[in-house]
Amino acid sequence: MGTRSRWGRRSAGVLVLLLLAGTAWGVGRAVLRDEPAPRVLGHYPPDGAEDVSPRARLDVVLNGSLSGVADRLRFSLVDAHGEAVPGAVHLDPAMRGVEFEPREPLASGRHRAVVEVPGVVEPVEWSFTVPSRAPLTRGPGGPVLLALDAEDPYDDFLAEVLRAEGLTAFTTVDVAGLDPGVLRRHEAVLLSRTPPGPAADALAGWVRRGGHAVLFRPRGALARLAGHVPAGRAPVPDGRVSTGQPAWAAAHPLHGPADVVRVGRGAEVVAQVLPGAGAGARAVPGVTVRRLGERGGRVTAFTWDLARAVVLTRQGNPAWAGREHDGHPPLRPNELFEAPPGEGEDWVDPGTAEVPHADEQMRLLSRQLVEASADAGRPLPRWWYLPRDHAAAVVLAADDHGVEDGTLAHFRRLVSGDPPGCVVARWECARGTSWIYPEAELTPAEADELVAAGFDLGAHVTTSCQNWSPRSLDLAYARGLRAFRARFPALPAQRGSRLHCVVTSDPLTQPRVERAWGIRLDMNYYRWPPEWVDRREGFMTGSGLPMRFSDLDGGLLDVHQQETHLVDEVFHGDADALRRLVSRARGPQGWVGAFGTHVDFTDSFADDLVSVARGLRVPVVSAEQLLAWTDARAATTYGHPQRDDRHVHFRVRGPSAAEVGGPGMLRAMMPLRTRDGVVRRVLHHGKDLPHDVREVQGLEYAVFDAVPGGYTVRYGPPARAG
């Protein structure tokens, strides 16, 4: 973040409409009289890009001025049907850039772009694809049914919760479309609202025949199905949830109300809500389980809105957005979590900052889903959180403001310390990301060398540490990315970002602007300032997992929020903070995490972190590596498992083993024990596959490699001792 930048003091320019530029940039000048003929250095989207946002703008960088010939510029864009895409052309003379802004969002399909100045700039043609993509809430199909309410602004985030918990095989429907036929094809359903009359009756019958319903703040018929009886009391506002399990050493704050209910006969309380923060507050039911029928039917009911609580824990208090109150202008993400003076408690209790409160709530849901599936004899596969059984990873991300011993020197030191024969794709070699200013002492040849070795480089976009408007932020990304492409035209398109000074005038504008420019991993949620953090390592957002942003009005933004947990300005001289995070990730707490970092090469913090990580055998990876693996994991699914005579058959589909990083990078987990016994064998295409046993949040799993192909898991009586 740092304010030590030469670049940070430069003022931003403005884009100028080409149509107004005409003769204003060089009346009477001969075309490029004193300059070489310009040529195109680079453009966005890159040629062949397959994942371009519908709201992307096209951007071209030249190595020379268009003075005197701007009115002859031709920029065309044609869609998949051969139709011209209408839009406006803007020219930035200071940055020698040209931007094409489509009038409407781009349609799906392959687009072809051409830019030229006849007789001056040779035609450059390239193509890219805007994918035809289902909504991000839609699952690929599978045994879990996600019934969403179009009027609920938060329940869309349940799709992201399932992905984060490795339960990627789910089907998404509107709650109004919940009918007996849909239910019959699934084994578990998540829903946040009571469906229309006949569907509620069908749901009750389906549960008694062995289905598992997970309900959030159930009402009416669904409350009765859960065994809830209204207690006649107002909901508990912003309480705390506790399960009493050893891993839950502290109660977790809930953002949002929890209903107060009495639990009828046959229902069991598995988590409680403690009202307020006062000592001796009387607990009320938080999560209940009721078993129905003789075929393993179950109703799990949360008295609070889990999706809302997780979103707000991760993204902060929207009521504090846009308010400067920490004494450190400009506006930053910590002000969404650090309470303004006189306005109560911080959003996440600093005294329990070591606990990933949001992640623990999600794991409470996944435990209920997996436990119910095992009890019913229909165990669900899921994926482990990180590659190769790792419980922790370090996301090494630097902001290089042009210091002398910067990106090149540090990354070369990482290479020199590589274990012999390490493989970058398997997260065996320490790698990292550096977002740099164009003035950073790095030549194009050196940048190419680093990228070829597996490092990730991009622009450190700046607003000169000033609060921004949506338009000025968009301009900052345009200029920053354009300048970087002009300096390093051969590098791949950038997909991660941390804005200089992590200025956050509006928390949701930032990911929207980032996505338009191809950014899909945001590291702006930065645990700072030092006096607030007080050197307590932990989680500002309550999470160690990269997950997409919720737009708070329904829907997901295709940009992953990744907290920067370890900031050099806070933890310099204390790289053991990483050791403490890792010990809790590997320990009985199971607080798994990809721990984001900030370094700016002004002290030894980067080297110290890598030294600790290597000593603990924790992978050190770039932001790009984390995003690529997260995408691959989410794209891996297994359809509907089939069962016969204590055997569970399923087929893993998705990216190839090579695309995930090789065999062993993605690990599958099956409940070790079901009513049919314990896992005795795991087979892949009929051949025995080794498996390990791991306990996660009190449940035991058989863990094995997951690559595309057919699997069989055989359950049977436990092996006899001796």
Image (cartoon, rainbow, N blue to C red):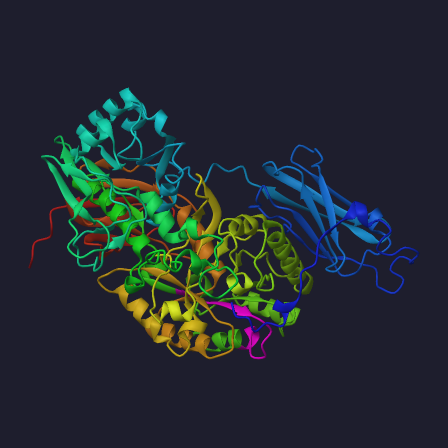
Tell me which residue sits at (17%, 57%) in the image.
Answer: 279
| Relative image position of residue 234 (x, y in whole percent) | 23, 39
Query: How many numbered dots are placed on residues in this image?
Result: 0
Is 649 placed left or right of 376 in the picture?
right
| Observer-nearest of 531 and 693 | 531
| Observer-nearest of 367 and 48 | 367
| Relative image position of residue 254 (x, y in whole percent) | 29, 49
Was residue 267 drawn as part of the magenta stretch in this picture? no
| Relative image position of residue 171 (x, y in whole percent) | 36, 35
- Residue 210 visible at all: no
Tell me which residue sits at (62%, 54%) in the image.
Answer: 472
- Residue 322 visible at all: yes
| Observer-nearest of 24 and 712 | 24
618 over 714 or under it: above or below: below
| Observer-nearest of 83 and 515 | 515
Q: Which residues are magenta?
A: 394-409
178 over 31 or under it: above or below: above
Tell me which residue sits at (48%, 71%) in the image.
Answer: 599
415 over 658 or under it: above or below: below
| Relative image position of residue 660 (x, y in whole percent) | 43, 54
Was residue 402 drawn as part of the magenta stretch in this picture? yes
Please identify the quarter of the rendering in which residue 354 is found. bottom left
Q: Residue furthest front?
A: 342
